Image: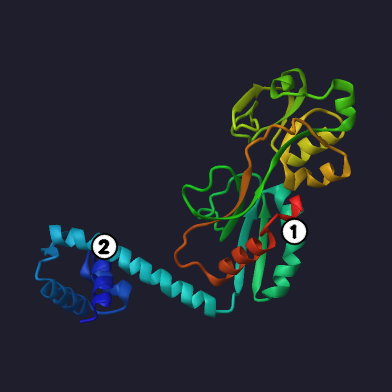
Amino acid sequence: MDRLRAMEVFVEVVRKNGFARAADALDTSPANVTRIIADLESHLGTRLLNRSSRKMSLTESGDALYERAKTIVEDMAEVEAIASSTSMTPRGLLRLNAPLSFGVLQLAPLWGKFMHRHPGVELEVALSDRVVDIVEEGYDLAIRISRSGSASHAARKLATSQNICCAAPAYLEKHGVPQVPQDLAAHRCIGYRYAATADEWHFSNQLGQADVVKVNCPMHTNNGDTARAVAVAGGGVIWQPTFLIGADLKAGRLVRVLPDYRLPDIDVLAVYPSRRHLSAKVRVMIDFLAEEFSGTPPWDR
């Protein structure tokens, strides 16, 4: 008896709640499914399924076996998917979603290189700061900027970006340079609408002690480029990730304030529906981005 095949058939019978439906899914006959289950029960010396003309249910032994067998079958499917994906040429349409600013500044310059390396993959890139449902909206992969990871999907960390508190030199010359976070309460700040902490800015000092300040925000925006442009024009103090404002800091258009205090870092994540059955096109994209952002990411070099 092929025990792995028997486990696969048993799991499918339970999932489909019937021998005939399992046979259809496995492209075999109901008689063959019945024989395999009977052989498995005989091999184990116990009944796994209670069967009648109207209803089928798991026995206590069947319930215990199902949980283990399901894991075994899924693990084997994943191993086969990994083996096949590494040998297959990546091809087909890859639908990818990414945040607007990150997509324009950090991802767009990479697409030509990726397409040259993988000519069989067709890209469809959608940029939006809205958190999309990648399953419902049909995306193969999403790039997300997050401090909390992904609870509902598989994710791989690609890079980290610092958050920096900064302002234009002209603004600081006119309004003064804040020395401690609480000084920000007297400044004009530009709020980011998607920030989890809203208008409470969370800092930590060099000892790791928290310092939270409620800031005054005469303007809010849901787009980091807008906040950056207002700050460069002298409109107030902002905090934004270095992938967005790194060039402004290097050029002196923005100046870091409160250098002895840190804001929480954020991660750049590749998020995808499941680790199982990961297609070759998605795998090579994730590996490509991880390679491009490895070590010190380009925005901090």
Mark 2 lies on a secondary structure that is helix
Decide which of 82, 257 is in the foreground and name it.
257
Q: Is residue 262 above or below residue 160?
A: above
Q: Residue at x 75, y 26 (%)?
A: 189
Image location of residue 223, percent across then percent down: 72, 39
Q: Which mark is residue 68?
A: 2
Q: Which residue is mark 1?
A: 108
| Residue 60 left/right relative to 213 | left
Screen quadrant of the N terminus: bottom left
Answer above or below: position of 132 versus 28.
above
Q: Where does the image place residue 94, in percent across and percent down from the top left?
A: 61, 65
Apparent side of residue 236 relative to residue 223 in the rendered image (left or right): right
Q: Is residue 64 left or right of residue 214?
A: left
Res. 16 in view? no
Q: Quadrant of residue 292?
A: bottom right
Coordinates of residue 246 in the picture (x, y in percent): 78, 46
Amino acid found under the numbered disc labelled 2: Arg
